[in-house]
Amino acid sequence: MIENEINLYFFDWFKNYNEEHNLEYPFSNKEIYSLEKVTSTWKTMNNEIIESKYPPLQAIKLQPSTDLEIEASPYKDIRIEVRQIETKDIKKLHSQINYSNTVLTIMTKQLTRVENSTSSSYHKEVPSSSRPVKPIYNLFNVPQKE
């Protein structure tokens, strides 16, 4: 491979090896399928409706209940020239924290969805006493312990 300058990716080789030796390829149907709606509807502070997986990088309105609407914003600035913290500055921080919590909630849902789909399809019961009949690779020039 070095002389011919050939790059061979492991998973390509591994798939071909399994096909040649009539072995089950362990990664054949391991795609993640989502059965639920992945996108969310976001309402911006300008009352625009945006549909996307993630919140837009602008101020949005969160509505945890029908009578409560909370502002969430990815970026806010605090005036540096003012030495004292004002209520407005604390509200800006709360807005940023609300946005961060929204993003974390979305990431948690996605991670849970991925974990649920992988746990049901990847874990296969394999008897602990089973050993490969034929090793996949051979070791050459390995010193043996005495």
Image: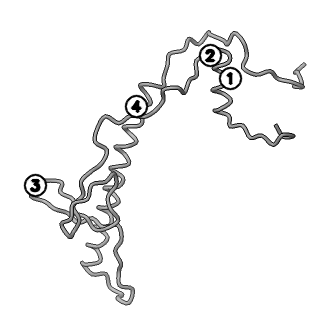
The label number, if any, that marks residue 35 in the structure image: none
Which amino acid lies under the numbered mark 3 shown in the image of this protein?
Answer: Thr
Label 3 vs 4, first from the N-terminus: 3
Q: Residues within 10 Å of mark 2 (few under 14, many from 20)?
A: few
Residue at the image point whose x is 68% and y is 30% from the top: 13
Label 3 vs 2, first from the N-terminus: 2
Quadrant containing the C terminus is top right
Structural distance between the alpha carbons of marks 3 and 4: 33 Å
Q: Residues within 10 Å of mark 1 (few under 14, many from 20)?
A: some
Would you place residue 140 above or below residue 11 in this image?
Answer: above
| Res 48 → quadrant | bottom left
Q: Are marks 3 and 2 in contact (CB under 8 Å)?
A: no
Label 4 vs 2, first from the N-terminus: 2
Q: Which residue is mark 1?
A: 17
Structural distance between the alpha carbons of marks 1 and 3: 58 Å
Which amino acid lies under the numbered mark 4 shown in the image of this protein?
Answer: Ser
Q: Nearer the viewer, residue 55 or 115?
A: 55
Residue 80 is situated, as x and y percent measured from the top left of the image, at 39, 86
Structural distance between the alpha carbons of marks 3 and 2: 57 Å
The label number, if any, that marks residue 66 in the structure image: 3
Q: Which residue is mark 2?
A: 23
Would you place residue 99 above or below residue 82 in this image?
Answer: above
Q: Which residue is mark 4?
A: 117
Which amino acid lies under the numbered mark 1 shown in the image of this protein?
Answer: Tyr
